Image (cartoon, rainbow, N blue to C red):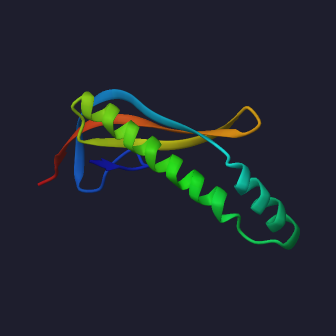
C-alpha cells in the first residue's frame, strides 16, 4: 500500500475517498535510556536510545494506520501527517493519520 504526504500520487488518479485513517503508538522511556541521555546531555551527541524508541513507535503507528485503511478497502493513503505528544512524564505518543483512497493507474 502506498502512503504519501501529498494530495495526489504521481501516475495515479484517486477514484474514491474512503475516509480518515489513523494509527498510534504510546511508548514509555526505559530508565537505562534516561541514564544514558543524562550523560549525553552533558557531553553532547545523539541520544540513540530515544531515536530508536521513536523510530519503532513511528513504524508501529504506520502499520496500524495501514491496517485501518485496508479494513476500508483502500489501496493508498494521501495527506499523511505525524503528530507527537507527551503522555505523562515518561511516555510519548506518535499519531499518524491520513485519508484512505482507492486509486487507478493513469494510462
- Left or right: residue 65 compared with residue 69: right
- Residue 38 at x, y = what percent? 83, 60
Residue situated in front as seen by the camera: 63 or 15: 63
- Left or right: residue 53 compared with residue 99: right
**Rendered view: 96 above or below 48:** above
- Left or right: residue 53 compared with residue 66: right
**Rendered view: 68 above or below 14:** above
Q: Residue at x 88, y 68 (%)?
A: 42
Q: Residue at x 11, y 55 (%)?
A: 107
- Residue 47 at x, y = what percent? 70, 64
- Left or right: residue 68 compared with residue 37: left
Q: Residue at x 71, y 56 (%)?
A: 33
Indicate the quadrant where residue 98 lies. Answer: top left
- Residue 93 at x, y = what percent? 60, 38
Check the image and name the residue furthest to the right: 42
Check the image and name the residue furthest to the front: 32
- Residue 80 at x, y = what percent? 45, 43
Q: Residue at x 23, y 50 (%)?
A: 12
Indicate the quadrant where residue 50 lies. Answer: bottom right
Residue situated in front as seen by the camera: 87 or 28: 28
Count of numbered badges drawn on the protein: 0
Residue situated in front as seen by the camera: 107 or 45: 45
Amino acid at each position: 500500500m502506498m502512503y504519501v504526504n501529498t494530495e495526489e500520487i504521481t501516475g495515479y488518479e484517486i477514484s474514491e475517498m474512503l475516509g480518515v485513517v489513523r494509527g498510534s503508538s504510546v511508548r514509555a522511556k526505559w530508565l537505562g535510556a534516561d541514564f544514558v541521555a543524562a550523560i549525553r546531555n552533558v557531553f553532547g551527541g545523539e541520544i540513540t536510545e530515544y531515536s530508536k524508541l521513536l523510530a519503532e513507535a513511528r513504524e508501529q503507528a504506520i502499520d496500524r494506520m495501514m491496517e485501518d485503511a485496508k479494513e476500508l478497502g483502500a489501496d493508498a493513503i494521501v495527506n499523511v501527517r505525524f503528530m507527537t505528544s507527551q503522555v505523562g512524564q515518561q511516555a510519548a505518543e506518535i499519531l499518524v493519520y491520513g485519508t484512505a483512497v482507492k486509486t487507478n493507474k493513469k494510462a
